[in-house]
Amino acid sequence: MYVILSREFFIAIYFFVFVFGLGACTSRWQKKAPSGSKQKISLSCSNGFVGNDSMGYVSGGGEAYEPTILMERPQIPVPKGMVLIPGGEFSMGGVDPTQLEGGGRENMNDARPIHRVKLSPFFMDAAEVTNADFSAFVTATGYITLAERTPTSEELPGVLPEQLVAGSIVFSPPAHTVDLTQYTQWWQYIPGANWRHPEGPSSSILGKENHPVVHIAWEDAMAYAKWAGKRLPTEAEWEFAARGGQAGDVYAWGNTFKKNNAFMANTFQGNFPQHNSGADGYVSTAPVKSFSSNAFGLYDMAGNAWEWCSDWYRHDQYNANSSGVIENPKGPPASHDPLEPGVAKKVQRGGSYLCTDQYCTRYMVGTRGKGDWRSPANHIGFRCVKDIVNQ
């Protein structure tokens, strides 16, 4: 069960309890032929799969994918550090991955039905916003992130003023095997943890200027985006960009977790949550662009740090979008998660360095993440987009 609890929950625990130490199996896309005309390409969904993955893909919903149709790319200057994402129409959503090799335990019901979406062109940051980027914003504006602010008595009624301490949620691996349904065993509320001190007050981002900034709440990401003359991507924009023009692939790079036996993203290897072996080269965040880009030239669209989207999260939102072609969807007017109905959540995408098929496979491109919009943690960051008309 994938649940993200609120910052307030962990603060409350910190203070009141303890300190946590096949015929039909074809996905297709269209690309521009040298002449400028559209050329239809067909790809068997067995391409890249192993064993019975092809049939698992079909039974998981993969037969619902239709061709991706890309618009002509506008011939305009691209802002520094960004990539032009052509508009187009695509099939949005994810299959039930539980029958796929490495598919994990979750059926991802909130990512279906797969439905058609049409988007206008936009620019997107090629990489996640880094510590250096965010530092420039803070230097220019004096902005104070939510993790650096002292919680208020309104947030935590009944807590004594001296017990209200600024901090954030930090991954803290236990020393032994734990029940994976008891997720509080690997998260701690750490006073003094924030974007400058990712693991707590004694830690630093020195030497990690090119790592993604973390401990970012949704409102922090919004503030940065406004300062930069950008905005947060919609969930549809994020997925369209991550797919890179492909239709129905399981990952941003294809249908196998590794490509040519190489890791394609910064995720968790080893025994979750107690030991990350770092087989991909990293046990925490990695410098942005450490792994290959997708077909659009975007880096880290899987793993490394979760990325905020502008949309509120609803588990059943795709049911509302299942008829016809939805143009430039902005998401629902309010949040609802039946697992935590009292927690307002925004969509997060891409997974993080903590994702693994033992617990969370949401580095798969069509899957959806969610998080309390006012709860930062040391695996949550963001990237921005920019409207072409606002260039």
Image (cartoon, rainbow, N blue to C red):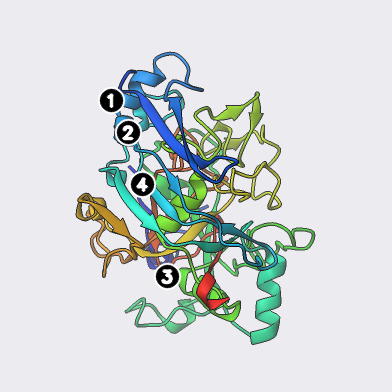
Give the labeled residue for mark 1: 59
Q: Residues within 10 Å of mark 1 (few under 14, many from 20)?
A: some
Residue extending farthest to the top is: 51
Give me the C-alpha separation between circle 3 and circle 4: 27 Å
The residues tagged by marks 3 and 1 sit, at their Cα atoms, a distance apart of 37 Å
Q: Secondary structure at mark 3?
A: loop
Residue 355 in the figure: left or right of residue 53: right
**Left or right: where 308 falls relative to 261:** left
Q: Name which residue type carries label 2.
A: Asp
The disc at residue 374 is 3
Mark 4 lies on residue:
92
Which residue is outermost to the right?
207
Q: From the viewer's side, name the closer residue of 389 and 249.
A: 389
Residue 308 image point, x, y percent:
47, 61
| Mark 2 element type | loop
Mark 3 and mark 2: Cα distance apart in space:
29 Å
Identify the residue shown where x is 25% and y is 65%.
342
Image disc number at residue 96: 2
Amino acid type at mark 4: Met
> Does the CB distance between marks 3 and 4 fall below 8 Å?
no
Q: Which mark is residue 324?
A: none
Q: Is residue 25 left or right of residue 233?
A: left
